[in-house]
Amino acid sequence: MNLKTDVSQLTQAQREMVAYFNDGTVSGAFSQKLAAAVAAVKADAIRGGIYMTIEEYAALKSAYAQESERIKTITGLAALNMSRAQIIEFLKTNMELSEEAQAAYDNAMAAHA
């Protein structure tokens, strides 16, 4: 079902589902059950760990992309025969890394090996 659809042709339960998924609105019996089910999944110690909001998923994908770019940069600098100290200084200066610069270097070189 398209969540951006014209809801005038949908059943009451379908309208509630679309509203709930679009903006979290709980407006009737069906969406109350849906909200309760989502809350139960989030609260479950086992399944809750795999439930992710769209915002959390986007943040995770962004972090992976940043890490991937960081690895490419570090291994590229190493290929230019820059020393570990030079690369760490580059990371601190140009990639706004401070404490984590050494760990980023070590992780990138381990991933590249």
Image: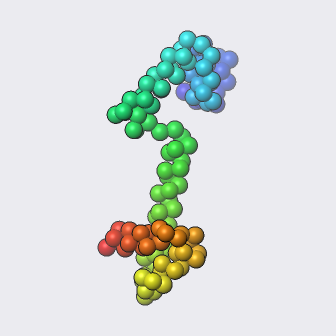
Q: x, y (%) of residue 27? A: 62, 16
The structure residue drawn at horizontal position 54% and vertical position 48%, both measured from the top left corner, is 58
Q: Is residue 60 above or below residue 65?
A: above
Residue located farthest toward the left when viewing the structure as drawn: 113
Query: How are the residues colored?
Result: rainbow
Residue 102 lies in quadrant: bottom left
Which quadrant would the N terminus be assigned to in this image? top right
Total marks in image: 0
Residue located farthest toward the front when viewing the structure as drawn: 99
Note whether residue 14 is visible: no
The structure residue drawn at horizontal position 47% and vertical position 26%, both measured from the top left corner, is 38
Which quadrant would the C terminus be assigned to in this image? bottom left
Residue placed most toward the observer, 4 or 79: 79
The structure residue drawn at horizontal position 52% and vertical position 38%, both measured from the top left corner, is 53
Note whether residue 12 is visible: yes
Q: Is residue 3 above or below residue 80?
A: above
The structure residue drawn at horizontal position 49% and vertical position 69%, both measured from the top left corner, is 99
Q: x, y (%) of residue 41? A: 42, 28
Residue placed most toward the observer, 7 or 84: 84
Residue 97 shown left or right of residue 8 in the figure = left
Q: x, y (%) of residue 80? A: 45, 86
Q: Is residue 102 above or below residue 27?
A: below
Residue 17 lies in quadrant: top right
